[in-house]
Image (tube, rainbow, N blue to C red):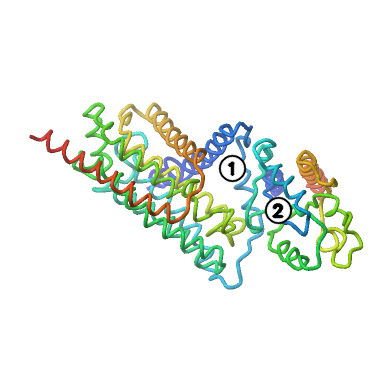
Amino acid sequence: MILSLLQILIFPGFLFLFILALSAEYIDRKLYARMQTRVGPPWFQPFADFIKLLSKELIIPELADRFIFKILPLVACAAAATAFLFIPVYNPQSLFTFKGNIVAVVYILTIPTLTYFLGGWYSRSLYSLIGSMRVLTQLFSYEVPLLMAVLAPGVLASSWTFSAVINFYGANGFLFLVNIIAFAVAIIAVQGKLEKVPFDIPEAETEIVAGTFTEYTGPLYAYFKLAMNIQAISVAALLAAVFMPFGYNLGFFLGIIIFLLKILFIIAVLTVVRTIFARIRMDQMVRFCWKYLTPMALLQILINIIIKAAVTQ
Amino acid sequence: MIKSVQKLINWARLKSPWIIHFNTGACNACDIEIVAAITPTYDLERFGVQLKGTPRHADVLLCSGPVTRQIKDRLVRIYEQLPEPKFVIAVGTCACSGGVFDGCYNMLSGIDEAIPVSAYIPGCPASPDAIIDGLTKLLKHFEESEAKKLTKAGC
């Protein structure tokens, strides 16, 4: 009982995740700054932002539903952090495990996006309304290729459980390199999930002020920002477990170091993508996702099915 | 305990001033300079400054231009939308005193006739260096006054 409470609250639960999420934001912003040949923020920047936002005045719009308006950021935080508990960190077994937990994690990671939509909807502001409609439109375009890409490695391992996938690829050397197409598809789709630059249409500053978060002030906005960072970490851990299934049976410390390196790699790739692209339009995004990303993910599943048939014969 | 929490909050407020830019009837020269100040060349993010699109997220309101009578209500409204604690910086000579527009029938002379102002940055237009200098000076002044308040409270 106490052990599982410690695991949920400290490691690999909330505290670990909190520090990791804010450090990831720092790394993202610093890399972004360095790639624009400037100095960038100091290391404590995300922590200072978080504390400052917590200490600011809380304003709730007159027309907004007070209860839902206040509860949504916490729901977003909780959902993003819950997803992390089902993802393996340093050993193939995650903290809480059951059959088919890859599917469960992908669906839990959809809940924060839905809270962004509801937050914008209940703010009763025009800008946040437009933003929330864009969140939903975007959700329907990136979610399908993301789900197919994340499930593709499981097709080859004939299981959608993390431990089975990791053990299968661990026993087969460099077979995980087969999934490189799905990895690329997932990286691009995740950019939409995290609302980073090529797909930051829902919170496009230059068009709709701040999108869904327009009316959120102080502490509530801090929790939304934290939820976004935790979501980034959870997604990175998910991709690391599914597409880079190595280094999971090396003990605690080495395992943690390899896990952090993998997260760092994925965050860095996401930052490079964010730096070199500009924002695209909503219709371009939907067309791109359905015309190119989804067929690529289907192609990966087809390749995996063919390899599986060839191996078993 | 309360003192150290207050110190932490002051430190955080000092390290992450988020700005919002509002044109109160300027000729656009100051606006271009403000936009230039947040480009990678001047790199305001070293001080934790981020440009925000909505007043709900911002701490510092950068105003440029003498306040026209038409925009006065909007300025007051934007100011009231900023959550406490907040600062206002008047950028450019027109924003400080009305400049060449002083005495016009359709203008107020300066931001401070509409809303309280924390810092004035003169110049026609105020250069990005001057804007950064003014912002850091405002933060420094804030730090000192808060430290004084803490010692005065005797805790």
The residue depicted at 24 percent of the width and 30 percent of the height is A175
Amino acid type for the residue under numbered disc 2:
His
The residue depicted at 28 percent of the width and 47 percent of the height is A295
Q: Nearer the viewer, mark 2 or mark 1?
A: 2
> What percent of the width, then of the height, locates residue B102?
90, 59
Which type of secondary structure does the marked residue at label 1 adopt?
helix
Give the class, few, some or many, for how many residues have Cα within 10 Å of label 1's Cα (few <14, many ≥20). many
Which residue is farthest right? B103
* Residue B1 shows up from this direction: no
Q: Relative to A263, is B12 above or below?
A: below
Whole-angstrom CA distance, mark 2 to mark 1, is: 22 Å
Rendered-image quadrant of the C terminus of chain A? top left
Q: Nearer the viewer, residue B117 or B35?
A: B35
User: Do the residues bearing badges 2 and 1 touch, measured as CB atoms within 8 Å?
Assistant: no
The residue depicted at 36 percent of the width and 34 percent of the height is A90
Which type of secondary structure does the marked residue at label 2 adopt?
strand
The residue depicted at 81 percent of the width and 61 percent of the height is B67
* Residue A138 shows up from this direction: yes
Dividing the picture into quadrants, the one containing residue A57 is: bottom right
Q: Nearer the viewer, residue B100 or A289?
A: B100
Label 2 lies in what chain? B
Q: Relative to A239, is B23 above or below?
A: below
**Residue for badge 2:** B21
Q: Nearer the viewer, residue A117 or B148?
A: A117
Relative to residue B141, is residue A298 drawn left or right? Answer: left
Dot label at residue A46: 1
